[in-house]
Image: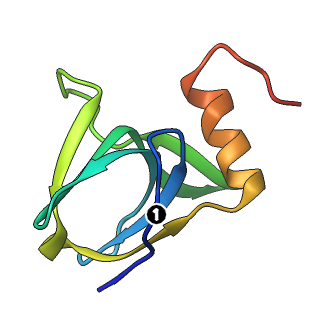
Amino acid sequence: MLIERGFTSADVVSLKLINGEELIARFDSETADTIKIVKPMCVTLNGQGVGLMPWMFLGNGKEVTLNKSHIFAMMSSKHEAADQYRDSTTDIALR
């Protein structure tokens, strides 16, 4: 498992899960066995390129705790992807 270190709670991270799903989310915290993320979005391909959609449509909360054993890799998101994520999850337009 490749996990960069030194994230803060304001960082937008990209995660590749062992089932192949790719997520983008705001990092919250981590323990030895888990990583907590906020407002995870699933990366999808559409006619215009890469798109984002909610990872869990019926979930009741914004925070998700993932077991590190289910994460293949986690790293900082590209600047453009982080901006798109923030546009999708906040009322702040970054462009």
- Residue 51 x/y as whole percent: 62, 49
Query: Looking at the image, which residue is at 18% across and 55% down?
Result: 66
Residue drawn 60% across the image and 29% down it:
88
Give, as a three-letter code, the residue at label 1: Gly
Residue on which disc 1 sits: 6
Question: Where, quadrant-wise, is the N terminus in this rendering?
Answer: bottom left
- Residue sitting nearer the eye, 36 or 15: 36
> How would you rate the neighbour count of disc 1 (Cα within 10 Å): few for under 14, some for 14-19, many for 20 or more?
few
Q: Is residue 69 at least partly visible in the picture? A: yes
Nearer to me, 47 or 20: 20
- Can residue 47 be spotted in the picture? no
Percent of width and height locating residue 16: 38, 72
Above or below: residue 3 compared with residue 79: below
Residue 59, located in which quarter of the rendered image? Answer: top left
Relative height, residue 25 to residue 59 (above, below)? below
For image coordinates 48% across by 40% down, the residue present is 53
Eyeballing the image, is 67 above or below 63? below
